[in-house]
Amino acid sequence: MEITAGPPVLARQMDRAPNAAGAAVLQASRELASFCLRPKGLYGRYGKPVLDKLLILAVLPIALPIIALCALALWIESGQPFYTQQRLGRSGKRFSILKLRTMVRDADAVLESYLAANPAMRAEWDEMQKLKNDPRITRVGNFLRVTSIDELPQIWNVLIGDMSLIGPRPMMPEQLEMYGDPKSYFALRPGITGLWQVSARNNSRFTYRNEVDGAYRRNLSLPMDLTILIKTVGVVLRRTGC
C-alpha cells in the first residue's frame, strides 16, 4: 500500500503555519500516523523485533557496567549523567530518548550565543544540524561521542519498543520540516544504528537522510541488518565522522 494522503497533509500544515514548526509537526505527525506503511515482509514485521530483544539481552551484561562507569564519570565532571529528549518514532509517535549527557548545562542557550557570534558556524549548523567543533560538549562527553557510548542507554528504548537496534536515526520534531516526505521514516522504528549512520554518519547534509532511509525501507532484510551491525563496529573503531 502506498501513502497518498500523508505528504499533502504535511504540506498543508506547514503552509498554514510556516513560523510555528512545532505545532505543525505535532498535528501533521498525528494525521500521518494512520497512513504509514508497515515494514515489508515477515522479517520486517516479526523477525526484526525478535532479533532486537535477543541481541539486547545478549549485550546487557557488558553494556550495563560500561553505562554505570561512564555515568559516574559524568556525575563527577558535571552532575546529572543522563538526559532525555523528545524524538519522533514510528507513525510520528513522540517518545523520550535516553542518552548519556555529553553537553554542558543550558546547552541550547550556549549554542544560540555561539551561532549568533559565528555566522560560518550558523551556516554549518543549518546545513548539517551538527557542528564539528561543538562548544557545548564536555571533555568526558567528547570521549563518549567519538566512541558512541553515549548511545548505549537507548537499549532501554529498544526494550520498551520505541526504537530498534537498526533503523533511521531518531529525528527531533523540529527537524521534520527539513526532512521532506517522512513516509519511509514513519514506516519504521528509529534505530541506535542504521544505514545512514554507517554510510555517512555525521559527514553529510541533513537532507541526505531522507534518501538513505528510503533505501533502507525498500531493501529491509536480515542480511542487510546484519551487515549494518558489522559495519557499525568498524565505524565506531575508526571513529568515522565523529
Image (spheres, helix red, strand yellow):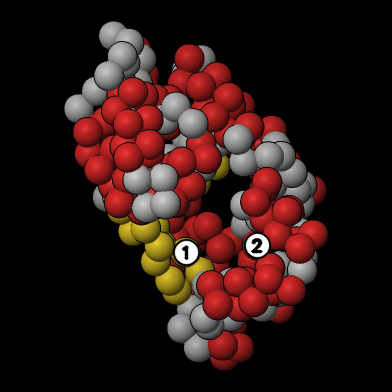
Residue 148's disc number = none
Mark 2, residue position? 145
Which quadrant, please, contains the C terminus? bottom right
- Is 71 on the left or on the right of 41, as rendered? right
The correct choice, above or below, for 79 with respect to 45 in the image is below
Q: Is residue 95 visible?
A: yes
- Name the kind of residue labelled 2 in the image: Arg
Q: Residue furthest top?
A: 1
Q: Check disc 1: other Cα within 10 Å, few if <14, some if 14-19, many if 20+.
A: many
Residue 98: image quadrant is: bottom left
Which comes sooner in the sequence, label 2 or label 1? 1
The correct choice, above or below, for 106 with respect to 239 in the image is below
Residue 185 x %, y %: 42, 31
Secondary structure under tag 1 reads strand
Residue in front for this viewpoint, 199 or 11: 11
- Name the kind of residue labelled 1 in the image: Lys
Residue at mark 2 to residue at mark 1: CA–CA distance: 11 Å
The correct choice, above or below, for 56 with respect to 66 in the image is above
The number of discs equals 2
- Is 195 on the left or on the right of 172, as rendered? right
Residue 99's disc number = 1
Secondary structure under tag 2 reads helix
**Residue drawn at 77 percent across, 47 percent down:** 240
The correct choice, above or below, for 168 with respect to 155 in the image is above
**Residue drawn at 68 percent across, 39 percent down:** 205
